[in-house]
Amino acid sequence: MRFFVLFLGAAALVAGCANPGTPALNYTVPLQPEGASAYVEKPGWATQRFAVAAANPLATDAGYQILKAGGSATDAAIAVQMVLALVEPQSSGIGGGAFLLHYNGRVVDAFDGRETAPAGATENLFLDAEGKLLAFFPAAVVGGRAVGTPGTVRMLEMAHRQHGKLPWATLFEPTIALAQGGFRVSARLNALLKTETELQKDPVAAAYFYQADGAPLPVGHVLRNPALAEVLKRIASQGGQALMEGEVAQAMVDKVQQHPSNPGTLALTDLARYQPLRREALCHDYRARARDFRVCGFPPPSSGAIAVGQILGMLNATQAAALPLENGVPGADWLHLYTEASRLAFADRAQYVADPAFVSAPAGRWDSLLAPTYLAERAALIGQGPDARRRETAPPGTPGGEQSAYAPMADQREYGTSHISIVDGDGNALAMTTTIEAAFGARQMVNVWPGLAGGFLLNNELTDFSFAPTDARGTPIANRVQAGKRPRSSMAPTLVFDKTSGALLMSGGSPGGALIIHFTAKTLYGVLNWGLAPQQAINLPNFASLNGPTLLEEKRFPASTVEALKARGHAVRELELTSGLQAITRSEASGKVQWLGGADPRREGVVMGD
Ligand code: GLY
């Protein structure tokens, strides 16, 4: 089921072929829609054999064409990621990092392409000369300071070696064709360019994204990126080495180290030595509607799976399961329980979660934070019943009974990111969340060859570390900056299985910084507990607490709900809360399996499949 019904006809660009003897891809550039970026209702999708969900129609379409050509879920994810780097450059790309959770029909693997702090980074990275914390924006974000060693390409290369079917080079054909032939600037890209204040200060980015009078490129403008096409051609033929060594690596290093006001330390050795990692997925049992599930997510350095699992587990130890949706949205009693569970989960996240190569898990195991007895103990702190009020403070717990040697990390801004979910026709599935951190990352566009326009953006992922290395008493913070360390993430790519049969039931995830945890938890809860199709679950209004105020998506909840929460002592803030969820779920009717797909109406994503 292809969402584009028309093709560019004579203008269709047919890209090159794979090696003899391997399936070929005849990539066809689709007709490109000019979608809106505001809340746009999505139909929800149903497919029979395979499905791909991504944040931009051109990216989804590339994944679809790869699957049609016999590619695996991993092959499709690589093609989708490369197109996203071109058409959704604000969110992810070859200058960033990603987590990929893969299921091959038997086991779940977690591929870690998180950025690392360069060898030259110290715990004082985000302190000024007087030892005060830098302002987050623009001081910390913009320039070379926060650029981590990018890991997405190396990680995808590792995943491809394990799970790829089509030749590596074939997976770059869609993006090279689009970068050379041009793609239409989407409404979302245009809207974000309009609100930018820093990107246009980078001369390469200014020349690429803005017109001579300083106005952003309009919606529908056909934008070409020959510089990115050239880098991708080299990665396609030589592998990740073409990015991490040689002249492309040198251009990244120059961009970071020679930034005129805010240089960083990224060096050729950081790039050459970068290693993606294969980790064990973090899985836990979950019960909803008298059915047992196994929920698998990404372990630290991501805090996503732990926080999502804690919230769901604590809710299960409260009266939440007895509370249905009220007129199609969560009611005040349920939101009280949810946000109180969230506050406790975020307190643990601030206390414990960081790169496992640098900090030990509480009680020696990350799943101590998900142990049912521990979560029941934590849930007992939540006030229940009609008169229960919000707690004054939500402190961290002591999983496994061990006191932490670390101080909690203060709340910090987090942003960015894009999510991809795919199931292929051979029983493989994946959930991949990918990022350059802030929208447009560090606002630094790398151009290797001045004669070619465009390039790629560098991440500012190091701002996901704690700016403060210690608390006021000098106790270290687990997620402080250290050379070679991976910053804590909130990314929560998730795969859900039926615990009894082992069948894959769902792949999902979202962008949104720390709010990723809430957007993902909402969608899981909607599907597993309220029995919603993925599109309906994604459509539900967003809500959150980061252990501060109770956040509600503006204009989506009745006034009576807001008032009821305030009466319970919640400080309510109504905000945009723009998620970018994508999810695919398995559904079975009369013995026939189908895949239901959903894409967030708040962004430009679509689902495709056959
Ligand atoms: N920078 C977004 C995340 O990793 O959570």
Image: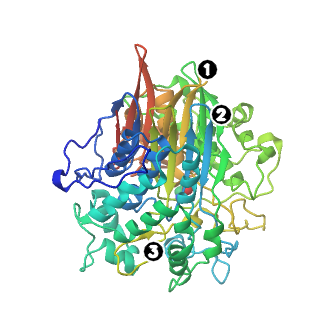
Density class for disc 1 (Cα within 10 Å; few <14, some 14-19, many ≥20) is few
Nearer the observer, 244 or 468: 244
> From what the image shows, is residue 46 above or below residue 567?
above
Q: Quadrant of residue 191?
A: bottom left
Read off the residue under disc 3. 446
Toward the right, the furthest residue is 402
Labels 3 and 2: the sequence-earlier one: 2
568 relative to 607 in the view: left or right = right
Q: Amino acid at mark 1?
A: Thr
Q: Which residue is mark 2?
A: 284
Residue 329 image position (x, y, % from top left): 40, 33
* Within-10-Å neighbours for mark 3: few <14, some 14–19, many 20+: many
In the picture, residue 276 is in which quadrant? bottom right
Label 2 sits on a secondary structure element that is: strand
**Among the two numbered marks 3 and 1 on one chain, the one whose residue lies closer to the N terminus:** 3
As drawn, the label of residue 500 is 1
Q: Mark 2: which amino acid?
A: His
Name the image quarter holding the N terminus: top left
Residue 149 seen in the figure: yes
Residue situated furthest top in the rendering: 590
